[in-house]
Image (cartoon, rainbow, N blue to C red):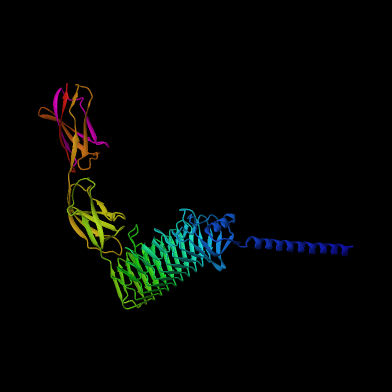
Amino acid sequence: MNKKIIGILSLLLIFLTMSVVCAEENQTSANLTSSSPIAVTGDSFDDVNEAIKSAQSDDVIELEGNYNGNKNGNPISIDKGVTIQGSSNGAVLDAKMLSKVFVIKANNVILKDLTIQNSYGSAILNEYGDKKFDLTIINCSFINNYESIDGGAILHTNMGTLTVINSTFESNNADFGGAIYISSENFKVINSNFTDNVATYLGGAIHCLSDSMSISGCQFNGNRASKDSSGGAIFSFYANGIIEDSKFNNNRADSGGAIYAKDNLTVKNSSFTSNVVNKQAGAISVFSQLDEKGNFDSKLSIFDSNFTSNTATDVSCIYVELCDVDISNSKFDDNQEVYIRLGSFKNTNNTLKNVKVDNTVQMIVSPEKYSVSYDSGKSLKVRLHAGEGRYIENARIKVVVTVGKKTKTFYGYTDPDYYDACIELSKLPAGKYSIKVSLDSKGIKSDPVKKTITIKKAETIVKAPKVTAKYKKSKKFTIKVKHKSTHYKVKSLKLKVKVYTGKKFKKYIVKTNKKGIATINTKNLKRGSHKVAITSKNNNYIVNKKSTIIIK
């Protein structure tokens, strides 16, 4: 009996196991079926759009052959996170200069194994501001795409990451970012080539405004920025950039033949050869400013890299301004120059022979003659000139005023927009003072400026209308005081008011309120006409006003 039960249970166990295996095989088969690429028939952008409409997120859409833009100018619109890939025989998307190729309105889009060419307007538009639309491009070619403003091949302006892998960009054109214009959180380019891309102004190949930029294993050949331009290959603005294992050859611009950056830039194991500029820095130019605390805002770090035959009208290789520089284990041709204009320099195991560090700026103090009325709000202005129309912002300025045997110190910072440090000195008591103006920021030097300033007593506008009052009745005699230069109401000003009865007078000391008004009561005055003389008890103001009070 027990043997029969055991046998039956064994048969049931075998049956259940086979059922589970079959179910798993069926499920696997179903998964394989659902992930099979969606093949697109036809030869136009409209045909690709129809395939996207019927697809779901995470589907793969496969293209084979040539797909052309339509006269209606409609690009391919991607509104879900799909992968669009070329078949093993290849796929070409040709806009025929009629439209863009892709407009992306979704997150997690992947473009793979495609040739994208002849776009009018950025070949790929992926914008939408504060939304996060990650875009990955793998093994794609971008050829002869044009945009009148930003990003000939790719315009990516949202919070998502743009990742480019094993791709080529050739002969793309725009005003800013001949191949790629990006403003986002993260930007990555891996093992990709940029050749003969052109920007009218900034970034022949790449114009980057991302928070971080990583470029690895890439080649930049013959890219240029052509008109009042910077960054023949790369223009990077406020992006903490890392460039490694990359080559920059024959790129051109007015400044920064290969790279023009404004923020931290690290270059590792890379080479810069025969890059050319009309002005400064055949290879790399880094411009920055002081941070809000007056310290250098950026750092250029170069490790294990080579610089050969880069040329410029001024400074053949590297030019930096307001930046710390660290160069290690790198090789420079004998004619390669490095000029650090305001910054520090660390030079470790390099073949670098031509280095100049200049940390001196010119201090301009205005007006030449500082003679102002007390509390007029007119400031002493200090500007730091670094040459060629360049001024330094966020530098701390120190002004020491000698007051008798003592000194009083004032501070200010040069303004990021107008460049002047405005030091308010008009609230010093009226008189003449010796001052010393000096620079109080690390790493920058300037000769101090000594001057004599004058604070004059402030003239005032005083209104004290004639008053007629009844004997023994309360009535206010009102005095209003304004600063003559600023027309502001003068508050808390002590006034001496003499009310005459014949040759005798009664003296009142009154103070203006926050509206610049002081009053006296006429109740205790005798009958008759009383002349009134008003003067200041404060040595910083001139008050001289006469009026009349009549008591009947």
Q: Quadrant of the C terminus?
A: top left
Q: Is residue 307 magenta?
A: no
- Residue 81 visible in this rendered orientation of the protein: no
- In which image quadrant can residue 231 be found? bottom left
> In this orientation, which residue lies closer to the viewer: 309 or 485?
309
Q: Position of residue 395 (x, y in %)?
A: 30, 58
Residue at the extreme left: 503
> In this orientation, which residue lies closer to the viewer: 234 or 4?
234
> In this orientation, which residue lies closer to the viewer: 497 or 40?
40
Q: Position of residue 292 (x, y in %)?
A: 34, 57
- In which image quadrant can residue 266 be found? bottom left
Numbered range of the magenta stretch: 509-538
Q: Is residue 459 above or below residue 47?
A: above
Q: Residue at x 82, y 64 (%)?
A: 10
Q: Is residue 443 above or below residue 517?
A: below
> In this orientation, which residue lies closer to the viewer: 409 or 84?
84
Q: Is residue 516 magenta?
A: yes
- Residue 473 visible in this rendered orientation of the protein: yes
Q: Position of residue 353 (x, y in %)?
A: 31, 77
Q: Quadrant of the N terminus?
A: bottom right
Residue at the extreme front: 71
Q: Position of residue 269 (x, y in %)?
A: 43, 74
Q: Is residue 36 above or below residue 273?
A: above
Count of picture labels: 0
Q: Is residue 78 above or below residue 188?
A: above
Q: Residue at x 34, y 58 (%)?
A: 293
